[in-house]
Amino acid sequence: MYSFLVKSKGEFLLDKLELLKEEENLQNTLNILNEETLNYIEKRKAISDYILDYRKKYIEEYRDDEDKLVEYFDHERYIKEESYKAIDRKLSEFVKLKESPYFGKINFIDDGFSEELYIGRYGLTPEGTYEPVIVDWRAPVASLFYKGMLGKTSYTSPQGEIPIDILGRRQLIVKKAKLEGYFDSDINIQDEILQMVLSSKSGEKLKDIVNTIQKEQDEIIRADRSKVVVVNGVAGSGKTTIALHRVAYLLYNYRQQLSDKVLILGPNDIFMDYISEVLPNLGETAVRNETFLSFAYKEIGLDEEVLDITAYLEEVLRGNKSVIDEIKYKSSKEFIELLDKKTNEIEENYFDIKAVEFLGKEIVSIEEIKELFEVHYKYMPIFRRSQKIKRILFSKIKDIRDEKVREINNNAKEEKAKLTSEELIIEENNIEFRRRIAIRDVVREVMKSKAYIESWINNDEIVNIYKDFMKVEKLSYLDLTAILYLMIKLNGKKSSYEIKHVVIDEAQDYNMLQFIVLKELTGCRSYTIVGDSNQRLVKAEEIPAMLRLKEIFGGFFNLYELKKSYRSTYQIMEYASKLLDENAVVPFVRKGEFDVLETTVPKDDMEDLIDVILNLLEDYQEERYENIAVITKDKEELNTIAPELKKYTNILAFNKSDIIYRGGKVLVPSYYAKGLEFDAVIIVDFDENTDNLIKYIMSTRALHRLSVIKVR
């Protein structure tokens, strides 16, 4: 259906002309896409032909040189992979563009010249030309489309700020290579399209939003790469999507610096799988995805299991005070001070320095070794320093050993020189035997001296040091950050691979120690950090660490607040907002067809509870909602209803973190639901004392329908 405003016959004719122009442009674009596709297929064939031809010549020339041939085939494989990778990337982009080449258009005046640009998911510039047919949404000039305005403005290019005058903005709806409609800026482009998108059903994966990015979201996506960008956004404000689009934007504009050097840290494996298709859909795959637990586990090199965050969250939701107190303490400034105190103790008292003796003589005094520790190598972390000094002491022993061996060899040589030919025949073996015995004695002394040095200069494993002074046997996820901190302080540890940009999602649950560790471990100064201060399961501190990062990043810290929620209907967000202490959420005005439904069932009537859930599931399915979640506070409550529900309906229970969600009906505890969204949600509330924050998290998972069953 075409979406046009028609006020008069003249305007109607104008709209018909505009329609014809847009359809003609679409057809021309599709033709160019087809030509470029054939061109790249031909390029691929040409590379193959060239490689085969060159291979024949090379093999003929070096048929008898195996090393040369191995070296050539390694080089050929690299060239082929790199060339094919670039071509396959373009062909993949062309396939997606053929479905929907572009979604926006801007007309503007630049330095007196009129420009018209079409904005799409990927760019398209025909071979041998410089004029783009489609501009990639990540290109600097494409930011004009997202400004939400007409008139004089500017955009930031590599050459600096470019002043321009926007004359027109148009949103185009192209599906399956057909123009279905367009909206001009004077009827509020973004809201019209956004209403359509938000009213659609959810998917099993998070989707990209290139055609509906809002002005305030675009500002965050295009923020300075060298900044620590922190987004504190309410549920449904698009925090995660913004973070992923920012990664795509940064990789597009700084590919050489950032390729294979971006790390995304998410809360759990379910969430990481849920967001897994956004970046590939935007053409980006060279990104590492981890949970903080798995990242820390690998960096430490642990070979033992630890208590993961799930076990702690279960106890938190049950109100276990000792667990809550432990989380608060290990998230506190006092805990960091304890770790610093321990590193200072190790600095001052860990090594009981001994003089180095060799062959009965002192060759390095205690004072000399102390000077190495306290003056010459003071700048190094203590354990790395000790290994450096150990190498110096070993080198000192080696020098004297070499000198002693030379002396022994010279003595033997001189002894032989004094003998006559007849005496040499008789004594040579004895002299050689004594020489070898003397050298063996020197080597034995070397080993003895080295062993003595190692007895006091080697340090215990940092994991064992931590366990010992914290008096813990079994490590938890809370301990891994502290161990990494000690590794950084004591050993100068750095991350095992190069990282130039870090994305942290659900950052409201990170403590200051985690941020310090990531900063020191990676040496990275470029971050995208997103979270919701309203969704902290444990308020370890009054103000979450993510909002206080100026303490460690100084002026490079930029905070953005997002108060508008786009996920849920007005009715759902109105219900959820009442659960918060402050009225922080401004819902996007999308009226749902239904209000939030509240039902009460008797506490001891499991049969009635299951009937109510089954009836709601049936109603939602009849309304053609595909992705439906039944959310409980924790696993214990989930396990109460899961066996009974599974008797009557096919439903997946999220009772562990490595389950992969493929859509449909699911049973999920509140903490696994964080960050996910569903068409419809049924909250089963067994406990009237459940924290309102938990209820808020559960409620804001719903896009279109929300029902709350109170078991009382």
Image (cartoon, grey):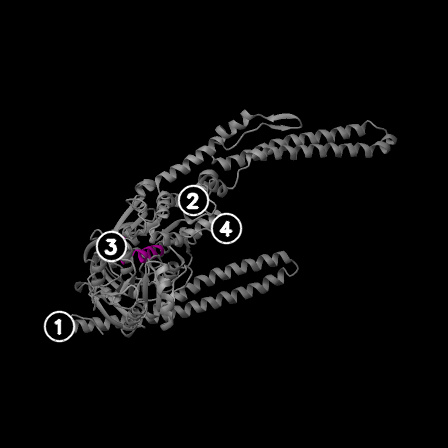
Q: Which of marks 2 and 4 is nearer the N terminus?
A: 4
Q: Is residue 379 left or right of residue 631?
A: right
Residues packed near mark 3 inside 10 Å, few (<14), some (14 to 19) or many (20 plus): some
Q: In which quarter of the image is residue 118?
A: bottom left
Q: What residue type is labelled 3?
A: Glu
**How far is the residue under mark 3 from the one under mark 2?**
32 Å
- In the image, residue 548 lies at what x, y percent? 30, 43
- Measure the C-alpha gap from mark 3 to mark 4: 45 Å
Discs 1/3, front: 3
Q: Name the residue under label 3.
A: 216
State which tag comes first along the sequence, 1 or 2. 1
Where is mark 1, residue-wise? 10
422 relative to 687, above or below? above
Nearest to the observer: residue 258 or residue 652: 652
* Label of residue 683 in the image: none
Disc 1 and disc 2 in contact, CB within 8 angstroms: no
Q: Which amino acid does label 2 sit on?
A: Leu
Tell me if residue 239 is in the magenta stretch: yes
Residue 521 bears which disc, if any?
2
Earlier-in-chain disc, 3 versus 4 = 3
Q: What element carries label 4?
A: loop
Residue 381 is situated, as x and y percent measured from the top left of the image, at 47, 36
Most frequent secondary structure within the magenta stretch: helix
Q: In the picture, residue 90 is in which quadrant?
A: bottom left
Extent of the magenta region: 233-247
Precedes in sequence: disc 4 or disc 1:
1
Quarter that holds the C terminus: bottom left
Amino acid tagged 4: Glu
**Label 1 CA crowd tier, 10 Å (few <14, some 14–19, many 20+):** few
In the rendered structure, which amino acid carries the disc numbered 1?
Answer: Gly
Residue 410: % across, % down = 74, 29
Nearer to the camera, 378 or 581? 581
